[in-house]
Amino acid sequence: MSLKVIYRGHLTDCNYSCEYCPFAKEKNSRELQALDKKDLDRFVDWVEQNSSADQPMEVFITPYGEALVRKWYQEAVIRLSHLPHVSKVAAQTNLAWNTQWLSRCNTQTTALWTTYHPDFVTEEKFVSKCNELAALQIRHSVGVVGLKQHFPQITSLRQRLPQDVYMWINAYKREVDYYSEEEIAFLEDIDYLFRLNLPWYESMGKDCKAGSEVVSIEGNGDLFRCHFIKTRKGNIFTDSLASMLKKETCSKATCHCHIGYIHLDAMKSHEVYGSGLLERIPVRFS
Ligand code: SF4
Ligand code: SF4
């Protein structure tokens, strides 16, 4: 079984400025960008040296902000996609960049989790980017945050996308009971898995694959079981990988983010997503 490695470097900036996001229109310094590049290169070297036929890896880049606009992330994805024991490289992105570099990726292993932000890009432009991905044979999911003011754009985007492209909707969770039952039904009609995204899962004491089959690695090499529990397990550049992997129950009261709760054993996410777990493409859309 492959180890899923969720990477988050030092970047915290973005070319968009979504109202609900802390990274909106941040601008990182040149020094921080240089550190991010150096550490990303070092991480990719580590993946190359530590993935093997016995320990294949899948890498998921989940930046704070937008990473794929940066050339060093593009080069990292290209390189990772061609490594013999990396079965998947996926990244979260807003797609606000030129797609041509993807032609250098291994299309068998590269996948994207793309998010549509109706306040910052026209539907025309976003759909045309998705069409470019399809032409380049890059597997991708498309999603959006289910803000009520965006319901017309959500409907319209679903109509424009090919039926075989999965469109997910993230529940807006900052307001309790934000949706009526009718609104949930409307969103569920577009994303048949929407209802799974609604709860704050009570995770304390529950078995979770994070820590044993999935790990979170930060730019400096520190390894955590997931992005949400900041108990450092060690550092990939000084500690052996095996010594940092451990099957444990969750120590947090709740887990509400898709990239966390999908790893709870009880979710049986492998049955829903199969090999498309990281890029969020369910088996029925594969
Ligand atoms: S595109 Fe993503 S990272 Fe950028 S501001 Fe919006 S939510 Fe935040
Ligand atoms: S349930 Fe969520 S918070 Fe708990 S270990 Fe798993 S991913 Fe981490």
Image (spheres, helix red, strand yellow):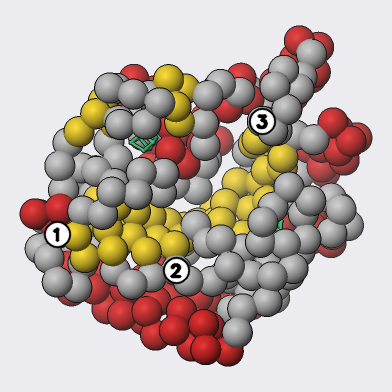
The tag earlier along the polypeptide, 3 or 1, is: 3
Q: Mark 2 and mark 1 in contact (Cβ < 8 Å)?
A: no
Q: How many marks?
A: 3
Judge from the rendering whether residue 262 lies leftward or rightward of residue 174; answer left or right: left
**Upstream in sequence: badge 1 or badge 2:** 2
Which comes sooner in the sequence, label 3 or label 2?
Answer: 2
Quadrant location of residue 268? top left
In-front residue for pair 251/259: 251
Residue 229, relative to residue 122: is it above or below? above
Q: Position of residue 58 (x, y in %)?
A: 33, 55
Q: Secondary structure at mark 1?
A: helix
Quadrant for ligand 1 reads bottom right
Instruction: State the SS at label 3.
Output: loop
Name the residue tied to disc 2: 9
Q: Give the residue type at disc 2.
A: Gly
Residue at (24% x, 43% y) in the render: 211
Question: Does dot 2 land on a helix, a strand or a loop?
Answer: loop
Give the side of residue 259 with respect to residue 148, left or right: left
Q: Which residue is mark 3?
A: 173
Q: What residue sits 54% from the left and 71% below the top?
A: 11
Task: Write down the residue under mark 1.
Answer: 241
The percent coordinates of residue 189 (x first, y second) are 73, 20
